[in-house]
Image (tube, helix red, strand yellow):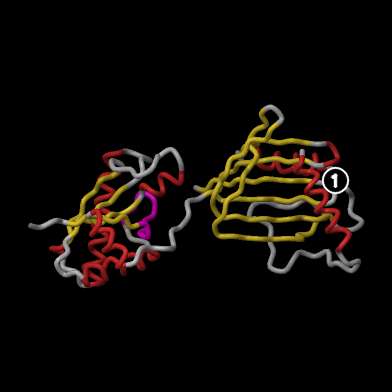
Amino acid sequence: MGRYSRSTLLVLVAVLTVPLAYTQTDASGSKDYPGITRMPSTFLQTYNHLKYDAFKFPVATVHNQEQYQSVEGERYFIRYKLKEGAELTSPLQKIRNYENAAKAVGGQVVWDLINGSNGGEATLKLHKGGSEIWVYINAYIYDYTLDIIEKQAMAQEVTMDASAMASSIADSGSVAIYGIYFDTAKSDLKPESEPAIDEIAKLLTSNSALKVYIVGHTDMVGDAAANVLLSKARAQSVINALVSKHGIAAARLIAFGNGPYAPVASNKSDDGRAKNRRVELVEIATK
């Protein structure tokens, strides 16, 4: 229960240091998380939003020790504070409100722990569209917080440049590219793939003798045979972009689909599956 003592200390420090004229309106630029309302007579004191981060959610208690699961994705942190003079609500009342709301829309109460009037915690799991939403609630008498993660794999924003690609091909005959993106089960290149395509074009332009297989790879989600066809279609989309937008000769490029058959990581985790979804350039060696 060390979490309560640390958080309670922080709350007390905040109360002691807040000016008497402190506003009781929502913080500038803040907003409720879409689809999750707040307890009555509270205002939004703190709001943080990160496009990608991680949070360790309590998911079980074993031998009086909390067990955690780290979830990565788009993250929100929201702190609500009770307005001055408003009717008090217990930590249990706050926790049960959110748990009941989650269950009403098909969500799951993964874990909770109530410590009477001293505080309460809960981890919820919801689904919104195709997204998995994790919510951690930490509740006290006068305030409570929500840590929310929209679970998703990170969008790779850093790509290898042409020089690094050339070095990898020289060393091993191939290079894996992780900056090429497709929607699920589709083969059309997404606009954010352009930086990686540009670097591949620079590589091929700077070395006119280089011929490569463009090899598509998928994770193991779905039918294997369909994934082989999908991976080849994705490889062909890369070739089409190189030929049509950058003037690379089509004769230098051959599409191949490996589907799920050459993983570089375990398919049992989101991170592993993200590593397996890639495009590789494999040098076509000539004598």
- Tell me: 204 left or right of 130: left
State the residue at coordinates (38%, 43%). 265
- Tell me: 45 left or right of 176: right
- Residue 42 versus residue 91 in the image, above or below: below
Element marked by disc 1: loop
For the residue carrying disc 1, how many other residues have a C-alpha within 10 Å: few (<14), some (14-19), or many (20+)? Answer: some
Q: Quadrant of the C terminus?
A: bottom left
Depth check: 260 or 173 in front? 173
- The quarter holding residue 164 reads bottom left
**Residue 217 horizontal/vertical position (percent):** 30, 48
Q: Is residue 185 magenta?
A: yes
- Residue 63 versus residue 174 in the image, above or below: above
Q: Quadrant of the N terminus?
A: top right
The residue most toward the front is 171
Residue indicated by mark 1: 89
Q: Which residues are magenta?
A: 178-187
Depth check: 218 or 209 in front? 209
**Residue 137 horizontal/vertical position (percent):** 71, 45
Would you say the magenta stretch is mainly helix, strand or loop?
Answer: loop
State the residue at coordinates (85%, 45%). 89
- The quarter holding residue 167 reads bottom left
